[in-house]
Amino acid sequence: MRSRYFIFIGLMVFLHPGCKDGLFSNKATDPVVAKVGDQYLFKSKLEELVHEGTSTTDSAAIVDGYIQNWIVENLMVREADKNVAADINLNKLVEEYRSSLLVYNYEKKLIDTRLDTLISNAEKVAFYEKNKAQYLLSHPVLKCIIAKVPAKSNDIKNIHNALGKSDLTEAMFLIKDKAVYHHIDTAMYMTIEDVVSLVPTNMIDPEKIAAGRVYQEKYKDFEYFVKILKYYDENKIPPFDYIDAKITKTILSERKITLLKNYRQQLYENGIANKDFEIF
């Protein structure tokens, strides 16, 4: 604690804007700030830590924290160096890690510059027809319309009747005009839990949900409506639009694998042609 106090006081002087040799000095000299064994922390390493406008107290705290962390880290490295098994080939590990980083970043560059990311709808539909059994639903999903309308509205009956029709134009118009809350995104899939959370308790019986059904219930000062547009039970094949994004992701993933596989094969064949390697 005492040593931290003196570090803090020293940094206050070190960082003070009136100090002739402050932290941001452009002089060629680079004073040592801390030392652990034969490892040195120089003042230049601290320059990027403190930004303009930071108070002297905050600056000192930031720099002090960095120094303490640097000391602990280097003490840990020194201790590890003394205790790690002697048979570990650090140079080999470093080289393998370097090679992995190089290959990873080069493959990323290849993907960024050469991968065809355009996927036609026809290709996605063909993939869906071939692989849809792999995407069985783990839970029911549905599309629906939800409306919460003041119970005193004169259009309660009209809304109910309009929701019962196959053409929902009138229902949409009435709901937009009369509802204090509505969900009318007919392209969005929801879970049963999503729907239940928006309507009165026990209004929806999960065991009796069916496409085309209209639910209506009064609760306090409001009339609630739910029209089920589409319903897909668990363990059933989902509709194409529900897994559209997953299909796109899978196709791109397969293209990446193919791209890199073909590139490696071409690289090998070029190596043979150019006599870039020998097998003994």
Image (cartoon, rainbow, N blue to C red):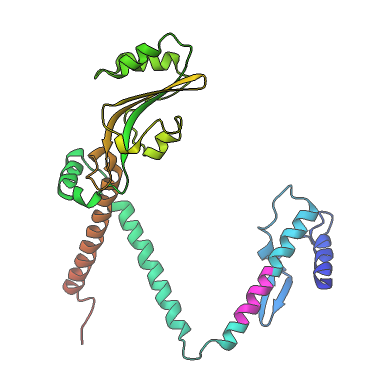
Looking at the image, residue 139 lies above or below residue 225: below
Q: Nearer the viewer, residue 270 or 82?
A: 82
Q: At 80% across and 55% down in the image, what residue appears?
A: 57
**In the orientation shown, which residue stands out farthest toward the top?**
154
State the quadrant of the N terminus: bottom right
Judge from the rendering whether residue 106 lies leftward or rightward of residue 87; answer left or right.
Answer: left
Residue 53 lies within the magenta run: no
| Residue 223 can be seen, yes or no | yes
Residue 136 at x, y = what percent?
A: 25, 49
State the quadrant of the C terminus: bottom left
**In the orientation shown, which residue stands out farthest toward the bottom?**
86
Q: Quadrant of residue 276?
A: bottom left
Residue 258 at x, y = what percent?
A: 22, 59
Looking at the image, residue 145 lies above or below residue 273: above
Range shown magenta: 69-78
Q: Nearer the viewer, residue 149 or 66?
A: 149
- Count of numbered circles in the view: 0
**Magenta span main SS:** helix
Residue 236 at x, y = what percent?
A: 23, 45
| Residue 185 can be seen, yes or no | no
Q: At 35% across and 17% down in the image, what residue appears?
A: 172
Q: Nearer the viewer, residue 243 or 158?
A: 158
Judge from the rendering whether residue 166 lies leftward or rightward of residue 108; answer left or right.
Answer: left
Q: At 36% across and 15% down in the image, what residue appears?
A: 159
Judge from the rendering whether residue 76 lies leftward or rightward of residue 240; answer left or right.
Answer: right
Looking at the image, residue 243 lies above or below residue 267: above
Q: At 23% across and 39% down in the image, what residue appears?
A: 239
